[in-house]
Image (cartoon, rainbow, N blue to C red):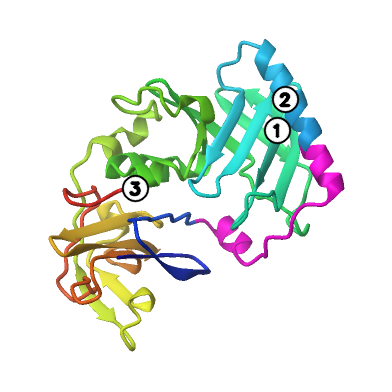
Amino acid sequence: MFISKSPKIPKIIVSSFVLLFLFSSHLFAQNNRHDEPISEELYGILEKRKEFIQQEVSTNKNEWSGTYTQGDHHPTVFMWSANRGFLTWGSHHTFFPSRINFGKAEFLNNRLTIKPEISKEHLNFQYIPTELSMIKWDEQHFLIPSDRLINFAYAVHSGADSRIVEYFTKSEDYQKSRKGLPNLPKEFGKVLTMKAIKPRITAVKITDDRIFDAEITLNLGRADKLVEGMIFYHVKSSGSISIVITDLQEKSSKAEVVGISGSVENEIKPRIGLKFTSKVPDGYYDY
């Protein structure tokens, strides 16, 4: 059995080991919305812009233009070309678009700057970062929000594929090679190659065995290279537990549980002294 938790999404029990966690305030806000299908008018715009972008991509030689996806089960789709701008759409629980955005796109100095035309007040608003950095990882292309390059670096450091799918990856690259390290700016190099960070729990408060609502305090913080949204792992023969950093202090941090695997009888519960690691440990099944 595996239980996972995402912000504002009900707990679920699934037969396979699944951990999907997109930790950003924008997605946090969108998770409060219902899946309201886009109107026929917006669907017409989606189809028309998709066709125009695909036509331009098929004839130009810009390796970065094209279609990208973010997420696994209900991915957000993002596509762009120099003259036709960008188009993005997605859904929380259905395969019919319930969120959409589009607008102009400018490619300059290895960054993509976009100007969305649909505002956050719109029922079908799809959030999209307005500045995306182009990052190449061997043969694969990624579009990373410029203010989240450090988070991407920690995702690479963790070795967890479930973290990498949180970022826009060019669709045609999924079967291509991803050897070595991504070409992130050199200031992130130490994160990519550093040893695992291993915090431990110094305090925990659990009410009525509600593990996902546990209030966890760790002994490491900002001074120890932790960042908000960072995932840590603990594994033993009977199962595993994953936690995410929700609040940072200089020498300590707060965290909450985002995943548990194992039988109900043997599931791991957060307790004082329990140690975690920032790199996916042996025995951790990463979907």
Instruction: Please name the residue that numbered disc 3 is placed on.
Output: 287
- Name the disc covering residue 86, or none: 1
Classify mark 1: residues with Cα within 10 Å, few (<14), some (14-19) or many (20+).
many
Task: Give the mark nearest the N terminus, 3 or 1.
Answer: 1
Instruction: State yes or no: discs 1 and 2 in contact (Cβ < 8 Å).
Output: yes
* Drawn side of residue 67 relative to residue 221, left or right: right
Q: Nearer the viewer, residue 29 or 209?
A: 209
Amino acid type assigned to the residue bearing label 2 in the image? Ile
Res. 72 mark: none
Quadrant showing the N terminus: bottom left
> On the rendered structure, is 186 left or right of 23?
left
153 shown above or below 283: above
Residue 125 is situated, as x and y percent measured from the top left of the image, at 72, 53
The residue mark sitting in front, 3 or 1, is: 3
Residue 165 to residue 258: above or below: above
Q: Residue at x 44, y 40 (%)?
A: 149
Q: Most extreme residue toward the bottom, as rendered? A: 208
At 33% from the left and 89% from the top, the residue drawn is 208
What span is in magenta?
24-46
Sequence order check, earlier mark of 3 and 2: 2
In this rendered view, identify the residue nearer to me: 36 or 269: 36
Residue type, label 3 = Tyr
Quarter of the image for residue 64 reads top right
Residue 233's image quarter?
Answer: bottom left
Q: Which mark is residue 53?
A: 2
